[in-house]
Image (cartoon, helix red, strand yellow):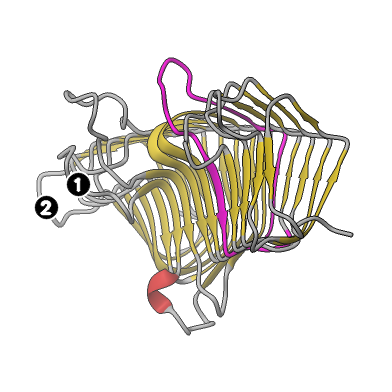
Amino acid sequence: EASPVVTDITILGHHPEADGIELFQCVQPIINKVSIRGCRHGILLATRNRNVLISECQIFENEGIGIFYDDVNLHQSNITHCHISYNRQGGVVVRDGNVRNLQITGCDIEANMPGDPDTPADHIANVLLDVSTSDGDKSKSIAEVSITGCTIQHSANYGADAEKTVAPGGANIRFLGKEVYPIDSVAITGNVMSDTTTNVHLQYCTDITLSGNTFFAPKPDQLIVTHSKRITVTGNTFNPREFERPGALRFVDSSDCVVSACSIFDAKSREGAVILENCDGFILNGLNLTDCSRGIVLKNSSDTLITNCRVARTDSGAPDLEIDQASKAIQLEGNRFNGTQTIAEGSLAK
């Protein structure tokens, strides 16, 4: 179908298997000023499409996914100026397929998680890119994506029981790549993200940039990066707002990443505010850590620079910097540590 246009309508679903709109082998389709609720998936993109524009839509309270790229071959798609909220299996979900040139811009993406606050949401997110279920298959891949200027949040902090997390395991942005073809070449810029188990979760990813974002109110973690390479985290602010939260930035089994020019405030994780575990080739530069329960922690990590960082008002008795015996070739330059440091003998570069 060439250049179909769907505009200025409301779709209200009355069947558990009814999707709002399905795009199947369309070229240059436009969906604009459409309200969709009560369906299974709001907008379903299937098989193969090209040059898709989705703008100024209200996609609200659907039982499945708000906008679902379902194992689709799709290059060039834009999602702009939409409200995508309360869809129970995710907001914008890209699963398998061959997807390139996806832009998500200027959207409010909120509380796309199970309706039951106790249901785990480990594989659900407001924005989910997922090729993890096709492990070993190089034909299914996702790359060349931008997520910019959005407000993205769950409701993790607002359950009836303050000690419990609503939709435990949920994330605002979650990328699940695979070893044979990581998710790569993604810019996450200028967003405000809050109120979920993990604000951003990256697994098997390469060449991802997170810049100029505001992170707050995680429950517990701000950022988790595992099995990834060349992740750049720069110019972001991390704070708990009115809550007391662990708020850690965790890097595990990852290499050649840069974390720079970030403000990290009041992270109450006893494990550390910035944690590198089994990592190699990192640069930590110009970080400002204040009022945290523990500072920068390196475990079994190597060939890493820590430069021009400031750590102040760390909890009494906890170190600003901790490097364990298994870590090697760690270089320190130009840092300002106001508290104690615990540095294992032989861990520093010679």
Residue 85: quarter of image: top left
Q: Earlier in the sequence, mark 2 or mark 1?
A: 2
Residue denoted by label 2: 16
User: Could you tell me if residue 335 is visible in this image?
Assistant: yes
The location of residue 255, given as percent across then percent down, is 68, 63
In-front residue for pair 291/61: 291
Task: Please provide the residue range marked out in magenta.
Answer: 230-256
Gap in angstroms between the C-alphas marked 2 and 1: 8 Å
Rendered image quadrant of residue 324 = bottom right
Tags 2 and 1 in contact by the CB under 8 Å rule? Answer: yes
Relative vertical location of residue 274 with respect to residue 312 in this rendering, above or below: below
**Helix, strand or loop at mark 2:** loop
Q: What residue is shown at x 76% (from left), y 60% (from top)?
A: 346
Neighbour tally class for label 2: few under 14, some 14-19, many 20 plus, Cα within 10 Å: few
Seen in the image, is 198 located left or right of residue 342?
left
- Tell me where residue 32 appears, x and y as whole percent: 45, 38
Residue at position x 31%, y 26% from top? 157
Kindly give the residue lying farthest to the left in the view shown.
15
Amino acid type of disc 2?
Answer: Pro
Q: Would you say residue 33 is visible in this rendering?
A: no
Circle 1 is placed at which residue position?
A: 63
On residue 101, which mark appears?
none
Q: How many marks?
A: 2
Q: Decide if residue 288 is on the left or right side of residue 197.
A: right
Which x, y percent locates residue 310?
75, 28
